Amino acid sequence: MPPGVGRRMNMVRAPKEFWSGLLFMAIGAAGVFFARDYAYGSALRMGPGYMPTVLSWCTVVLGLIILVRSFMADGPGLDGTDWRPLVMVLAAIGVFALLITRAGLVATIIATALVGGFASRELGRIELMILAAAIAVFCALVFVVGLGQPIELWPEWLADRIRAWGR
C-alpha cells in the first residue's frame, strides 16, 4: 500500500510551531479587541490606541508566519507538558496584581519573585530569596528613587510605624 493511503495524513509537520502560531494570533487578536475603543489617531498624531493596535496586528502577523511555517518545515513533536512553570508564572502575575496597591512595592516584588521563582526546579531557596530581595531593591531604586513614580514602598501600616520610629 502506498504511503498515506488508508490512513489520515497529518499536515502539521511542526506541532510546537503550530500551537505557538495560534497562541500568538490569539494574543494579538485580544490586543486588537481591547484597543478598539481607544482613539487611533494617525502616524503623525498617534492616539492612545495607535501603538497597542499596531503592535497587536504585528503579533497576529508573526503568529501567522509561525503557523504557516509549521506546515512547511519539520519540527519537534509535542512532549508532555510541565505545567509547573506555566502555573507559577501566571500565579506570580496574579500575586503582583493583588498586592501592588495593598502591600507596597517591596513586599509585592519579593512575593512575585518568590512565586515566579518556584517555576524553576534549578533555583535553590536561598538563591531565590537573595534574588527576590535584590530585585525588590533594584525596583525601588529605579521606579521610586530614580523615576519618581508615586508608588508606596511599604504597606500603609508599616510605613506609619517606620515614620513613627524615625521621629
Image (spheres, grey):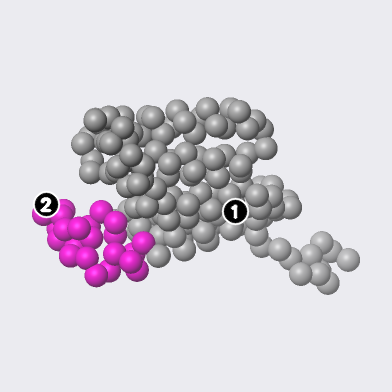
The secondary structure type at the circle numbered 2 is loop
Nearest the viewer among 111 and 48 is 111
**Which region shows up in magenta?**
31-53
The residue drawn where x is 49% and y is 34% is 132
Q: Residue furthest left?
A: 45
The residue drawn where x is 41% and y is 34% is 136
Q: Is residue 111 left or right of residue 150?
A: right
Real-space Cα separation, disc 2 to disc 1, in angstroms = 41 Å
- The x, y position of residue 2, in whole percent, is 84, 64
Q: Quadrant of residue 51?
A: bottom left
59 drawn magenta: no
Is residue 68 among what the camera can see? no
Q: Which residue is mark 2?
A: 44
- The x, y position of residue 137, in whole percent, is 39, 30
Tag 1: amino acid: Val
Nearest the viewer among 3 and 64 is 64
Quarter the N terminus occupies: bottom right
Is residue 128 among what the camera can see? yes
- The x, y position of residue 162, in whole percent, is 32, 35
Q: Earlier in the sequence, mark 2 or mark 1?
A: 2
Q: Which residue is mark 1?
A: 87
Q: Main secondary structure of the magenta part?
A: loop
> How many residues crowd around disc 2 within 10 Å: few (fewer than 14), some, or many (20 or more)?
few
The secondary structure type at the circle numbered 1 is helix
The residue drawn where x is 23% and y is 41% is 149
Quarter the C terminus occupies: top left
Task: Count how many numbered circles sit on residues in the image.
Answer: 2
Tag 2: amino acid: Leu
Q: Is residue 41 left or right of residue 62?
A: left
* Mark seen at residue 102: none
Q: Quadrant of residue 166?
A: top left
